[in-house]
Every structure is written in structure tokens, then in C-alpha cells.
Amino acid sequence: MPQHQFTRRRALWLGLAALTGLGTSTVARTITTAQTALRNSPAASLDKLARQTQVTGEQSLRQRAKAKGLIYGAAARRANLFTDPALAKAYQAECGILVPEWELKWSSGDARLRPTLQTFDFSRSDWMLRFAQSHDMQMRGHVLVWHLGLPDWFEEQVNRQNAEQVLVRHIQTVAGHYAGKLHSWDVVNEAIEPNNRRADGLRITSWLQLLGPDYLDLAFRAAAAADPQAKLTYNDYGLEYDRPDHDARRRAVLKLLEQLKAQGTPIHAFGLQAHLEGHETRFNPNKLRRFLADVASLGLEIYITELDVIDNRLPRHPTNRDRLIAQAYEDFLTVALDEPAVKLIVTWGLSDRYTWLSDFHPRSDRAAVRPLLLDANLNRKLAWHAVARAIDQAPSR
Ligand code: G3I
């Protein structure tokens, strides 16, 4: 589907949806006019695609993905799965893989994997693995090395003298604890930041300042030694759109992956987070396709690792908002799943009931955000159907 058709269709719906604030007669007249225009335009077939809001059959996303040689799953928090049986049931039904949103970070949410410099607390992450295994789900580890989600003691107690030992011991202990039990690890997360103006495009983080650029290779080698079976992944964001910032990030990520492969770093996959922006119309399928092909040409698998749609700049009305969100999922996945190296789709949550976006990207009108595939009552939304349709129409792996 050429880019202009994506842009025109979404721009039209964005414009229409923005009109919902006007009187109903104005909106009705405008929508009729627009629909007539659409019906007679080359984009009509695209809009019909968008209008095919329901997929046939009751198969879950995990079943549909498996039929194509893909894996679909979602991030979750133990705190939610443990206290919300209906939610747990939805994960069991829809997900072939589980990603702990908090429990395998050094410190996040209610999880403290690293209570102190000397200690580890696997109670919450072990619960997540038991949950996954008891429902025939795989689990992927997120994240061994990141500049965020670090405990309060880190800054005071980690220094140039002990940083390498602290990093290697963390990876040996955590990846070793789960050796042979995980699909993959996000070994390093979000190490790129072109705005930090380094020639290598690396983000200036505690890890870089303490250990230099070789901290990435050090981390991957420690992870490979601790768990030779897990697929070792570099994970990053801000790569999906036809924008100068995303262009710069794609160039920097590709350069990093090429460098890691050239120096023999044991890396097996690239994680594309895909926190999509519902209001963004600068989506160029050819640019995304080319980036994915370039990553795949390095011999890497590609995982869509944190898929959701930020909706805080979309109109309030749920009907229009859900349609735009569904279109964002469909536009992105239709292109991504054309790349055979893409093996895994993880949404960053499953239900609007629990999403990081409520706290991190709230709406100015204070309306509840609606970024995910199930609504807050765990009903399937247009977004669920859009993802199901993209999976059903994807080439088999
Ligand atoms: O829910 C509580 C809220 O009640 C409280 O008022 C608020 C202030 O303390 O905290 C809220 O919990 C926070 C939670 O996000 C809300 O989603 C936790 O303290 C905070 O640690 C947690 O942050 C997580 C963040 O990573 C840092 O670990 C997010 O949940 C999580 O979705 C986010 O995920 C990251 C990926 O790991 C990497 N890629 C980006 C992605 C989004 O930032």
C-alpha cells in the first residue's frame, strides 16, 4: 500500500474524528461527505479494509499467531495477575508468551529484584515464571541492563572500581537463575540517543560513564555464558515513523547492531518496542520495511517487544478513537509482519485496565486512555481485530 494512501486515509479520519466536538448535524454531514469522497477515491479499498472491523472465528491471538509460526503475547505485572483472576484468564487465553513488566528489572513498580548491592529477590519473577509455565506460555526476560529502573542504592554504591563486577554478577545471577527457561532476554535496553551527540550514537548513561562503550559487549557475553539457550536481544524505541528524529535513531541503531555483529558480540535478535503514536500520520511503509530488512540482513531475528498506541492526542470520543488506534496497529503490523525475520509480537499490556500510559501519557481531558487490545472490561476492541487480521494475513514463518 503506497504511503500516500496511508497518509490520506489516516489524515481524513483524524480530521473527521477531530470534528466530533461540533454539532451532530455538522459532523453527520461531514462524515457523509467524507464517506462519499472516500467511496469514489482510490483510498476507498483502504477504508473498506479499515471498515472490516471484525475477523471471523473465535480463535485467540495466541492461536492465530501459532498458525503462522509467530508468537503473540503481552507484558504483565504480577500485582495485576495475582489480584485480578479475570485478567489472568484473559492472558491465559490470548498470550503465548509473557513479559514481566516490572519483576525482572533491578527495581520497578512494586518489584525489588535487587533490594541491595549484595542481594537478589526472585520471589515476584519466579511467580511470573510459574504463571507462564502453568498456562503453557513462554516467558521473555526484560531487562538486564538499562539506565532506568535502577534501585536507589545504585548511584551511591556503584563506581568505576566495582561497576564491571556489579554488572557481570547481576547478569550471571539473574540470567543464570532462569537459564534454559526463557525464550529470550532484553540484554541491553535503549542504549541509543543521537541527541547526546556522540559519534557512536550511544546514550550517555551511568553504564557508559562507568564502563565505556564496551559495556554492551560485556553484558551480552555475560548473558551468553549464563544462559546459552536464550535469544539475546538489543531493544530500543522511536524507530517507526518518517520523521528526522526517527531517521537518526534508525541510523544509529543499525550502526550499533552492525558494530556488535562485526566484533562477534553474541546477539541474536533486535527488539523494536513500537510504542506507536495514534496522532502521527508520518508513517512511511517503505522506510520501515527497509529498516527491518537491513536489520534482518545482519542475521538477526526481530521482535516487536512493547507494542501499544499512545492515544493522548486523539479525540476523546471512544468510537472514533478506537478506529484510529486500530488503524495504527494495522498500518504498522501489516508492514512489520511482511518481514520474515519478525518472529514475535508483544503488546505492552493486554487490557486498558492496566497500562503505563495512564501514568506516563495521560490525556489532558482526563478521559481514560484506550491504547490496548482489550477494553477495561476485557472485551475485544477494534484494535484486537486489527491485530488478529494483520496476523491472519501475514505470510507464514
Ligand atoms: O501505579 C503507580 C501509581 O499508583 C503511583 O501514583 C505512581 C507514582 O509512584 O507509580 C505508579 O507505578 C509506576 C508504574 O510505572 C505505572 O505504570 C511505577 O512506580 C513505575 O516504576 C513504573 O514504571 C515502569 C517503567 O518502565 C520503569 O520501570 C512502567 O510501568 C513500565 O511500563 C515501563 O516500561 C518501559 C520498558 O521497561 C522499556 N521501554 C519503555 C517502557 C515504557 O516506559
Image: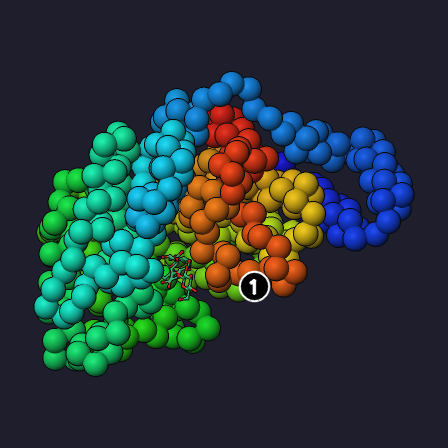
Protein image colouring? rainbow
The answer to which image quadrant residue 207 occupies is bottom left
Mark 1 lies on a secondary structure that is helix
Residue at 22 percent across and 34 percent down: it is: 133
Q: Quadrant of the N terminus?
A: top right
**Residue 39 place in picture, x, y as percent:** 80, 31
Q: Which quarter of the rendered image does ligand 1 occupy?
A: bottom left
Residue at 46 percent across and 51 percent down: it is: 355
Q: Is residue 160 left or right of residue 382?
A: left
Q: Is residue 212 left or right of residue 94?
A: left
**Residue 280 place in picture, x, y as percent:** 62, 54
Q: Residue furthest top?
A: 57
Residue at 79 percent across and 53 percent down: it is: 21
The answer to whether residue 370 of the structure is visible from this angle is yes
**Residue 152 place in picture, x, y as percent:** 26, 74
The answer to which image quadrant residue 87 occupies is top left
User: Which one is nearer the viewer's eye here, 265 or 20?
Assistant: 20
Q: Residues within 10 Å of mark 1 (few under 14, many from 20)?
A: few
The answer to whether residue 65 of the structure is visible from this angle is no
Residue at 42 percent across and 46 percent down: it is: 349
User: Which one is nearer the viewer's eye here, 363 or 139?
Assistant: 363
**Residue 82 place in picture, x, y as percent:** 31, 44
On screen, residue 20 above or below 56: below
The residue that label 1 is drawn on is 244
User: Which one is nearer the viewer's eye here, 362 or 50?
Assistant: 362
Q: Quadrant of the C terminus?
A: top left
Q: Which amino acid does the dot numbered 1 rest on?
A: Pro
